[in-house]
Amino acid sequence: MITILNDNFSQLNELLHEKTFSKIFILVDENTHEYCLPILLGNMETDLGFEILEIEAGEEMKNIQTANQLWEILTEMKADRKALIINLGGGVITDMGGFVASTYKRGIQFINIPTTLLSMCDASIGGKTGIDLMHYKNMVGTFAFPEQIFIYPKFLETLPFKELRSGFAEMLKHGLIADKAHWNQLIQIHKLDVEAVTPHIQTSMDIKQDVVEKDFHESNIRKTLNFGHTIGHAVESLCLQQGNPILHGEAVAMGMISEAHLAYLENLISEDDAKAIIENIQRYYPYLDISDFKDEDITALLLNDKKNTDSKINFSLLSSIGSCTYDHQCSQKNILDSLHFYRKLNDA
């Protein structure tokens, strides 16, 4: 269940009073510790003891070493199976915290309180948890629903612009795959800021939640949420491998541009639709330089994508603005042409 918090966090406090927890652990990074934790603690009402678990910020911390450290801390602090983890942060915190909670003692309860637009509209919703393996994104994880997701939109006011823009990519994706009206409303935003984005968050969350409820274990329609992520994740992984990580939404925006062109090459959408999608995404996102990445490096990562079967790359591609296919296998030529198309955009 997703709940929009009021200013005194009464819904969270009601849950803490109703449920029987033995102890609370609050997972943060240094940014949410500074900007968001004081707000949470100032409004949280409970007689339970709590501990703060802090990790460094950044995708590079989403690994088995960090998970192991958190498991050890929970063990040293004698966390039992009635303990609760509150994940206060962006996608890394909700992914990591959910993974640690769902595996510690075979599963303890957790709550997600996302603090970034990306996490509010995407990462915290859907019951996917995970960590990266080497430079492969979300390669190890579980399906585990949080006890509750609480959204406090005012946390967005603490975000740098790049983080807000990163989350906006997932909102655009939700419109493109499932709701043309949502897409049309979003592309009317001329100045990307908290005030402009906030009225559209609920719709974006509802789209993600609706898809997840239809297909929790990603057997069919949930795969459409991966539009833009097949190529986007490959580029994100290469950047991570080079020690030059980029924001997830930047990679997804690049992936959506490439995969929109790929959908056109595969005769799934018209050239006009592809052009409109690409030009609108370009309005919000700067060109991402992938000139250092060889085609074979990108395709090697595409072949290792989690959606693949029988060593064949499965794409989720648009069939129109507002609808998406999945398990679509493209010609190698068209995949490479879509990458070359993106590289040439910088020359335009």
Image (cartoon, rainbow, N blue to C red):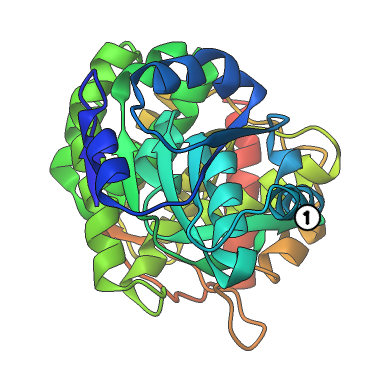
User: Which residue extends farthest bottom?
Assistant: 310
Q: Residue at x 65, y 47 (%)?
A: 340
Q: Is residue 300 above or below residue 6?
A: below
Q: Residue at x 32, y 71 (%)?
A: 221
Which quarter of the image is occupied by the C terminus? top right
Q: Which corner quadrant of the image does residue 326 belong to?
A: bottom left
Q: Is residue 34 toward the left or the right of residue 77 in the image?
A: left
Q: Is residue 347 above or below residue 130?
A: above
Residue 20 in the image: state x and y as whole percent. Answer: 35, 54
As rendered, which of 124 and 338 lies closer to the eye? 124
Residue of label 1: 68
Q: Residue at x 35, y 13 (%)?
A: 193
Q: Which corner quadrant of the image does residue 212 belong to?
A: bottom left
Q: Is residue 118 above or below residue 67?
A: above
Under circle 1, the secondary element is helix
Q: Is residue 254 visible?
A: no
